[in-house]
Amino acid sequence: MKPAKHRNRIQHTTLSTALALGLAVAPGAHAVELDYEISAGVIHNSNIILSETEEISETTIAPGIDFTLTHEGRSVDLVGRGNARYLYYTGDTFDNEVRGEFSGHMRWRMLPERLDFVVEDYLSQQPVDILSPVTPSNAQQVNILIGGPSLYLNLSDRTRAQFDARYSRSEAEETSEFDADRVNAAARVLHELGPTTRTSLNVESNRIRFDQAGVASDYDRLDGYVNFQRNLRQLDFSVDLGYSTLDIVDGDSYSSPLGRASLGWRFSPETSINAQASYQFSDTAQSLSSTPVDPDVPIGTDIDVSGVIVSSDPYEQRRLDLGFSHSGPRHGVDASAWYERSEYVEEDDFDNTNSGAAFAYTFRINPLLDLVASVDHQRRDFTVTSRLDKDTNFGVGLAKRFTRHWSARLDLRRRSRDSSVQGFSYDDNAVTVSLVYRR
């Protein structure tokens, strides 16, 4: 049974965010664009507990809703996407549950070009124990709520100063040592070098204080960096170069260079590539709150078997991401590859190297029928414990549209893990049939 205190706390945080966003757009509700899908699905898994030796099949009834909303007003901009599912396990393998994810960003221009107020919320499903199979009994909701003002001052025609203050609350349903209050303050000087080129000098200070003193170490972080970016018709480029220090309260201090770079190249309206690289201090809350808030990017409804390590310990991150996307009249391709090395500051048991690639292909057989196929593979090597997990997923599906609003879908999926630790490998086959109403 999940602790009611943590569950209620997260539900309260998410409800508060929803109310804030609703109040923000209420005066211009007619300008809110809301798209949603209501679905009713049946899922049959051959090994829902992801066991190597004692497989249990289960059929789940899963009604749900997916939604995106946008609002661009004179004083308020809002973008959000999310979903919710009610999962009824007919074989009683697990307790019935509600599972959901959400990413949202709201900007209220209190004084145009002078003072903004920003609210962000990131709700996701993550594993409780990253070393065990990520089944419904090993999953928890994690929520990051961020809010605060931004002040802008014009220093000249091309130069302005920006001051940001943010308070954030991070909470996990089960991993209570993750629960924390965070305060961020940033000062920036931004200069326009030309119509498409900008540079800035940035100083950011973070103060992290955890609820459970003695279990998780409080720490302070200071970042200083220079940013340079260009935005052209087909090319976007940005780079950060600087230095970071991290001070553990009543503990050691650490320092590291800071480097981040991103590149987006649009060959045509249908085809683009992107790349991101980073060398920096990071932590779980920072990682989860960097989820893209983009209505065109769907949120997964299944638990990610790779998962994020929900920990209070910051880590030094080296990460590289590459992506390719093509969306044509009949063919769609999305491909990505990544490499990440994480070295934790205090506890090194979770030091790991994570690498992989994913590929998805969509073929429009006719105007009312699509074929979708996907494959992804990931390797996660825990360096201290000498554990290597290799996860592979295959999927194929058919989507049939009957009318502008109604469609049906059939999906087949196979996921497997090959672990170097005996007893943690598994295979699972699943078939999903769903009926969808789209607004």
Image: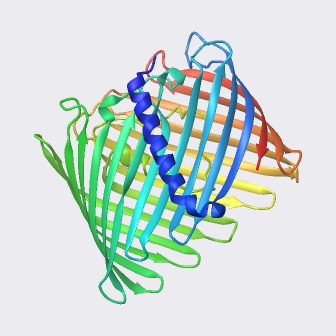
Residue at x 22% of width, y 29% of height: 215
In the rendered image, residue 131, in percent from the top left (x then y), is placed at 42, 25
In the visual, does 399 lie left or right of 127? right
In the rendered image, residue 12, in percent from the top left (x then y), is placed at 44, 37
Vertical order, 269 against 43 (above or below): below
Residue at x 75% of width, y 44% of height: 372
Q: Quadrant of residue 314?
A: top left
Q: Quadrant of residue 178?
A: top left
In the visual, does 128 lie left or right of 223? right
Vertical order, 237 against 35 (above or below): below
Residue at x 50% of width, y 69% of height: 75
In the rendered image, residue 96, in percent from the top left (x then y), is placed at 60, 20
Front residue of 82 and 313:
82
Q: Quadrant of residue 156?
A: bottom left
Vertical order, 148 against 228 (above or below): above
Furthest-left residue in this view: 250
